[in-house]
Every structure is written in structure tokens, then in C-alpha cells.
Image (cartoon, rainbow, N blue to C red):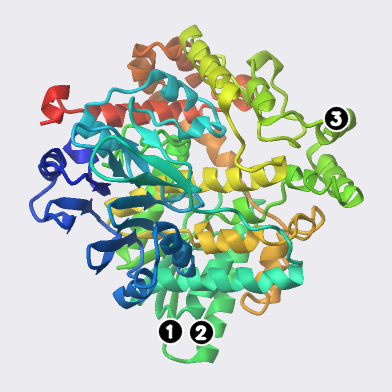
Amino acid sequence: MPGRESLRDFFVVLPDTDEGEAAAGHLRSAAPEGAFETVAHPSGRPWVLARLLVRNLVQVTRGTDALVLIGPNTTPAARLDAVLGPARDTLDLHRRLTELPGLGHVVSRIGDETCVRGTASGHRRVYHAAHPGGRIASDRPAPLARLTGAALDDGALALRLLDFVPHPLRERPVWQGVEEIDPAYALVLPGPGPRYSVRRWWRPPVPRLSLAEGAPLVAAALAASVAAHLQGRTRVSGELSGGMDSTSVTFLAQRAGARDTTLLTVAARDDRSEDQFWAEKGVAAARGAAARSGGGRKIEHTLVPADDAPLFYADLRATAGELLDEPFPVAPARARAAMLLGRAAATGSEYHLTGYGGDELFNGLASACQDLLPGKPLKAWNRISALRHQSGWPLLPTLRGMLFPPSFGAWLAGSLIDTATADSRTPQVSWGMRQAMRPWFTDKARGLIREEFRAAARRAQPIAPRPGRHMDLDTVRLGARCFQAMEDLGAGLGLPVAAPFFDDRVVEAVLSVRVEDRVVPWRYKPLLVEAMRGVVPDELLARTTKDHMSADDIQGLREHAASLRELWTDSVLAERGLIDAGQLRRLADDPYSPLLQQHPIDSTVSCETWLRTAQDAWAPTTNSEART
């Protein structure tokens, strides 16, 4: 089970039983005394036990009813009381909570019914597991694994070797016996004991608004989210890449009253990069706006030299001191992110803002246009045709995918392909991206992955009835899920890291806009541009390009070849029989291999480094001891 050092930032919801109280004592032993916040059952036993590094817990009560909000901002208790007071039941309470920014976990108790939910974006997730005293819920799977003595699940682990794990396989925790709740549903616990149910609390909006109608709603939701993050804070930092997403957050932070801001930009190694140019224009414009508004606001800009930024695959042996919920395919860039957040923390920043989530929300997806076919076939074809030309998709497969989409189950069953048939030119006009096996997967790994896909295809349901809306939501969920790695890095430094674009209210505002207005292939992020009109200077909204870091990836493979070879020499994945370490060692010696261009190693590296963290955090306690 996960050891002490892995349980740094989490909360659990415990049953009102002696065993639940004992579980609280067991978890307290994993942290220094006094590090926990406790909300009690009416009986006095612990109900919510939280160890929070950078998040806040706010609670209100109404007799024996209670509402607990756990998130990055401190919502005034009076505002929560105004929500709980008139609530007739659990469903009514959670409906009223949509008036607040969608940033945190919600735990409620009305009568004997406890309800636990995260956010619709998937940024805040809910896990649960059976325990002798009754079902226990948490925002992390690791505490549940600690309490139940759970072993790792090789099938779920093998899935993480793929680049993208599709819904619903992504919701398979890597520990046996631990379950994850779909973000649109809440976990409902009717009382002590093993019984539980799930209840839908969120539905995506119908996309009815025009661009002109929806843009102000997006602007208002984004502004409210940034303001909620910065509430009560005066010294903040931000990652200003020069792209439209981080630039928008930067200007919104100034409007929210940030008085002392440090913006960080990493210079690119590629001479053709435009990010630095646009970042410097953004800083100049922000300083000009601050000077005109008065109030003594200060904006500092730190340009990190390219040579100071770690390449991909640097410091692979390092860990963040936090066992992430699962292997996220971001480990190769961990050192780079740690450097940036470390510099932000060194400025004394109280909060770090990022533009993560902007691509997931505002980049046009061809599958979204597919939803236009029943009522607006010409608009659907105009947009998909333009995207087809941009991506080089063949005409006939594109038409076939548009006109004869498979059911979700049929798509899922056929979405896993062998390396020999992988084709990057496959039209993306279905339920998701096809996934290819890697040449270094063992027969055991391939067999586990195929069986997971077969089993899921027999019972899986899409997130939404049509491919476009399904992909809209799935893309946001995937991005929000991966952002946790960045958030946890910041938590280890005592620096909260925010992605306002993943706020539920922002997601809802974006998804309420008609597809034909959101996805316009000949315009770059049109909805964000119009939402930020009047907030971000027009000259910055005119940018239509986006830089990539492929040079850092290739150079990292070369510079850190020795570290990669060492990683595979004593591979934990190989010990579990999931990868061919010999082939990976040979590829480490050949960083320019065409095989690595066709089959990136990021997910495999992430699984390996995650397993090492898990192995180092594994305590020698037996299962029976874990339950005492």
C-alpha cells in the first residue's frame, strides 16, 4: 500500500462507524500531528478528514445537515449558508451550487444521505472503495489503497502505456478494488454500510447561442474564475508563453486586481519560434494598461534563457514527492515544469496562473462538426472539408466516417490497432483517436490491453449521444486530468497552480455556443478571440500561430540517452512483464530512429517513473494491518 510520503494532499469521507474512526487514525499516522482538518458526523466521529497543502476547506451546517467545499479559493461561509439554507434535498442543493465557480469538490449531508462529487470538467475527481466499516470516498485513489491494502492492477497499468486511454477505460484506477466516479455523476452514500449509488448531477448545455451571444458569457465566466482564484492574494505569477490562452489569463488577472505580478516566459531553442516575440508584446501592453489604470500595480517579466530550461527526459529519476493518481504522459517534461514553478515560487508568488485548458476548449474538432450533419449538412461539410485539407486526410475515408459513424461500442472495439497498420492520416471524425500498440510491448501487455478494450466495448456508453459532443467533453476531461501533475508539482512547493479554463462555469459557457460558431477552420479560436475583445489588445488577438517544442523532444532523446538507457536497465515495467527493456535500451542508443518518430516513448517513460515512485512509497504493512 502507498506509504507515508505519498499521502501529502488529500481528503477522505468516512462512514459513521467505529471502523471509520479507526481509518481516520490510521491516516493521521501518515502525517505530522495537527496537519489534518476534521469535519465531524453528528455523533462526533470524523466525517471529512482532510490534509490540504494549498487548498481550502469551508463548511456550513443547518442542524445535522452540512455542506463542505474543498477547493483553491475560500468561498465565504455566508454564501455557502445561503445555498444550503433553502435546499430541499441533495439534488436541489447541488443545483443551487452551480451559482458558484466550478473549482472544487463538494461534500454534503442532508438527513442520512452523504453526497460526494467533483467537477464536471474532470479536474476534481472522486474515488471510492469498500471498507469493513462502510464505503470510503476520497479525491485520491492512494489513500483508499492504503486503507484497503490494494495491489496494483496490471490491466489498468498496461492501458496507461498507450498515448491516450479512451473513455471509459481511463476511469479504471490502477489499484484493485478502487473505483472512480464519472465526473457528471456524484457518489451517494445512504448511511453506514456497503450500499452506495451514483446520481447524475450535471448535464452539458444545449449549444444554442450564436458567437455574439456566447462570447460575453465566456468572458464573464473566465473573469469570475480568475477573480475567484486570486481572491485575497496580491502577489501572483503566471506562465506567459505568448499564446492566446496564457495571454488572456494574464490580462484577466490584471483586471481582477493583481497588484504584484511576475510573468515567466521560457525562450525557445528553435530560431523560428514566435512565442517570445508575442510574449514581450503582451508584457508591454499589460504594463501600459497598468500604468493607465493607476494604483501602483507592478508587472515583472522573467525571460528564462533556453539553455536554462531542461530538455525533455531530464531528471527522470527525480520524483515530485507525491504519488500521482496514475501515470500521466507528462513525465518527460517534469523537470521543465519544476524549473518554471520553482522560479515562480522564488518570487514569493501566492498563486500561479496558467493557460492550460484553452486548447481543449477552443481548438476546432472535426468530430464536433459531424454533429451538424442532421440539420446543417452544408456547414458540416464546409468545416470538415477544410479540416481534412489542413490535416491531409484522404477524401473517401473522411466521407465514410462522416456518413456512416459506428456505434460507440463498435468504435471502441476497433480503435486499438497494431503498430504495423498505424496511420496518422486516419480522419478524426469519430468518437476518438485510434491507439496503436508500441513495438516494445510484450505479449502480456498486448493481451491485457486487448482484453480491457474488448470487455469495455461490450458495455461502454459514450459521454454524450453524438460523436461531436462526446469528443468535446472527453477532450476537456483528458486535459483536466493531466493538469493534476502540474498542480501537484506546485503543491510540493507550496504554490497553488490554477487553470481557470477548466472551471465548470467556463466549460458550460463554451459548450453553450453553436458548433458552427465555435469551430471555424479558417479562424484561430474564434470564440476566445471574441470573448477577449476589449480585454486583450486587438494586436495580440490577431495572432494565428502556435509554437511547438518538437526540437526539445528530439534533442532531449539525444542528450539524455544515457539516462534513458539506465532507466530501462533496471525497469520495473520489465519486471512486471509489460515491456521489452532490451529494445528500449537499443532505441536509447539511436535517438533519431524513425521508430521513435512514429511511436513516441512518453507514456512508457511516464509509467516507468510512476511505478518507481509507487514502489518507493510502498510500505511493508500487510493487508490485515492496513484495516486495523
Q: Residues within 10 Å of mark 3 (few under 14, many from 20)?
A: few
The numbered disc on residue 400 is 3
Query: Whole-percent x and y of residue 467?
Result: 71, 40
The numbered disc on residue 290 is 2
Q: Is residue 565 left or right of residue 282?
A: left
The mark closer to the camera, 3 or 1, is 3
Q: Amino acid at mark 3?
A: Arg
Q: Which residue matches tag 1?
A: 297
Secondary structure type for disc 2: helix
Q: Quadrant of residue 527 in the image? A: bottom right
Q: Amino acid at mark 2?
A: Ala
What residue is shown at x 66% (from left), y 76% (from top)? 537
Q: CA distance from mark 3 to mark 1?
A: 56 Å
User: Tag 1 or tag 3, which sits nearer the N-term?
Assistant: 1
Q: CA distance from mark 2 to mark 1?
A: 6 Å
> What quarter of the picture does the N terminus occupy?
top left
Query: Whole-percent x and y of residue 95?
Result: 48, 63
